[in-house]
Image (cartoon, rainbow, N blue to C red):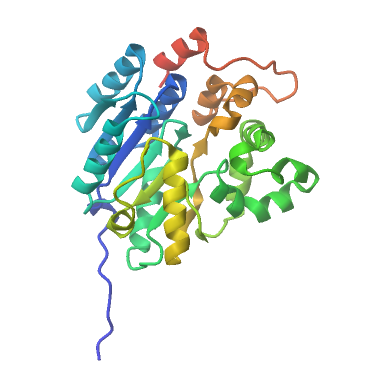
Amino acid sequence: MGKITYLQPRRSDVRPILVLLTSHRLDCFLVCIRCLERFTDFTRLAYVYVLADTIDQNHLAMARRFAARHGNVTVIERGPHGSSLAMRLTQNTLYVRHIDDAIITLDETIFVTPMWLEHLLDGYREHLARPDVPLVMPLVPISPAGRHVLNSFLRVAYPSDRNMYCGPPIEENWTYHRWIWEKLLYENMADIYLHDTPPKYSYVGHASANCLLLDRRMLERMLPFPDPPESLAAQDLAINALLHQDGLKAAVLGRSLAHHYSYPACEAYVRTHVPLERIWRYVQGRPDAPTSGLRAREASGRREMSRLRVSG
């Protein structure tokens, strides 16, 4: 009897849909789209939908300028924030329309890095024949899955800092947020981790919707999304309940990172210690001063916002 071989599309044949959710964090949105434009070939994406949840006119203008720079980007504005039936219907409609496509969900607080899309599509292709692995994610250090995958590395590389990365859940652990950003910005943690050639994939039983690739295998289990779908916490709960219920796993890319600015509960604290302008310099590969001697400043001030608008 002949061997059964699963036919997989070439990476160049997969053109995913990108759904970018933005709400009230204009400064995060600006860094997010600048990273996308710097590190993404938009011709590799079939469509890009910017789902705007009750944004102000300045924010909307920035989103429309982003769309104007790319022929496959559409801005869809909905509201009011946090309770919108229109947003739920919009998301459900989009996912049903594209249920035969690979779909990438992205939150405005996620900042992608070089080759993120190529790595993500490679991971997707390699797991198409795995019905038990319907989700693929980059390694996001400030996320429950990212913290889980980094556990061994952190214990070996930073044994004296154990109290910084062990503690409350990541979503509430402001100490971990700040510590990770300082290691990334000033101690080259990402390169140190990647230098040791970590495993190509790790498999976890939980996922975060803020940066995720999924397709029909998961969407058929999930749709319709819970109300309100614009709450990433609600989407995470729905996704993780299904993973647990059906014994499924998410594949985390060990060699591709994306950076999450902060969870809502820790955002105010992170903003006083990790300005977004400094992160933008980091993702551009520009040198910065060491942690000591730096004065904490707000990241959302008008001066920094104007710099972000003209950067990239």
Q: Position of residue 307 (x, y in %)?
A: 46, 13
Left or right of 286 on screen, residue 176: right
Quick one: 281 or 181, which is closer to the camera? Answer: 181
Question: In the rendered image, which quarter is residue 291 located in?
Answer: top right
Quick one: 291 or 175, which is closer to the camera? Answer: 175
Q: Position of residue 131 (x, y in %)?
A: 35, 67
Residue 248 visible, this orientation: no
Q: Position of residue 219 (x, y in %)?
A: 30, 53
Outermost residue to the bottom: 1
Left or right of 190 on screen, residue 157: right
Determine whether 267 is above or below 98 in the image: above
Outermost residue to the top: 303
Residue 31 visible, this orientation: yes
Question: In the rendered image, which quarter is residue 116 located in?
Answer: top left
Determine whether 199 is above or below 223 in the image: below
Q: Position of residue 175 (x, y in %)?
A: 69, 34
Q: The N terminus lies in which quarter of the figure?
A: bottom left
Quick one: 9 or 22, which is closer to the camera? Answer: 22
Determine whether 197 is above or below 266 in the image: below
Outermost residue to the right: 160
Quick one: 49 or 231, which is closer to the camera? Answer: 231
Q: Number of numbered discs present? A: 0
Tell me which residue sits at (32%, 12%) in the image: 57
Tell me which residue sits at (46%, 48%) in the image: 237
Q: The C terminus lies in which quarter of the figure?
A: top left
Tell me which residue sits at (25%, 25%) in the image: 67
Determine whether 166 is above or below 260 in the image: below
Left or right of 113 on screen, residue 217: left
